[in-house]
Amino acid sequence: MHFIAIALAIASGVKPEQGLYTAIFAGFVIAVLGGTRTQISGPTGAFIVIVYGIVQKYGYDGLVVATMIAGVMLILMGLARMGALLKFIPYPVTVGFTSGIALIIFSSQVSDFLGLRIERVPADFIEKWIEYGRHISTASLYTIGVAVASLLIIIFWNKITHKVPGQLIAILIVTAVVQIFQLPVDTIESRFGGVPNSLPTPHIPSISWSMASEAGAGEDVG
């Protein structure tokens, strides 16, 4: 799961290690406070869109505020037994929401898939594609090749066996090829300076009342 945690952290606009920290601590808390022994915890791809927009506009401290507000709302909704209302949500709404999230997540990965040299990818869907069009000339054939090869391995590996995840095989094979042939593609180290091998020192983020008020008022975060 740590590979997924790193990938979702990067896609959400934060550092890779923050994905690992979240997977460790959030997984532990959920396991301790979970309501059932069979409950499985893990990163949720749908939150990429929300987290990315918040980080782009308010930074990491703003994300902490939004998380605290969301936590309080979830507790209140749980106490009010509002989960029972889910059965009244129309099926097309669920399908449409899921499909929309999938499209937005797909669009957020186009820059890395093509190796575009964009300093800061916009949070809004339309603005993303406008930036992609402006920087399409910066696409890297090496990056595209690595991305396509990874996809093909993941797709066709399942035809060989289901015992070993295709994602793991893709990471091992493609990483080895990139290192052996020294292909000019971005890596975790070149882009983020590597991943720390120790846990961070706990600290209280800078939280202001104005930031909390904006988040609480439901201001658009992209």
Image (cartoon, grey):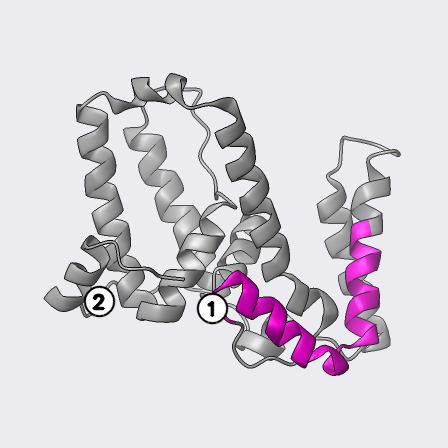
Classed neighbour count for the residue bearing mark 1: other residues with Cα under 10 Å, few (<14), some (14–19), many (≥20): few
Say the numbered circle drawn on residue 196.
Answer: 1
Task: Answer yes or no: is residue 169 visible.
Answer: yes
Tell me the CA gap for discs 2 and 1: 20 Å
Question: Which quadrant would the N terminus be assigned to in this image?
Answer: top right
* Stretch in magenta: 122-151
Amino acid carrying label 2: it is: Pro
112 displayed left or right of 150: left
Say the numbered circle drawn on residue 205.
Answer: 2
Say the numbered circle drawn on residue 107.
Answer: none
Image quadrant assignment for residue 149: bottom right
Label total for image = 2
Secondary structure of the residue carrying tag 1 is loop
Secondary structure of the residue carrying tag 2 is loop
36 displayed left or right of 161: left
- Where is residue 179 drawn, in percent x and y? 78, 72
136 displayed left or right of 97: right
Q: Which residue, as the protein is rendered here, is positioned at the far left?
A: 209
Which residue does the image show at 77% across and 52% down from the upper left?
A: 170
Which residue does the image show at 21% across and 49% down from the upper left?
A: 69
Asked whether residue 118 is drawn in magenta, I would say: no
Secondary structure, magenta segment, majority class: helix
86 displayed left or right of 173: left
Amino acid carrying label 1: it is: Pro
Which residue does the image show at 49% across and 31% down from the upper left?
A: 93
Q: Comparing marks 2 and 1, which lies closer to the viewer?
A: 2
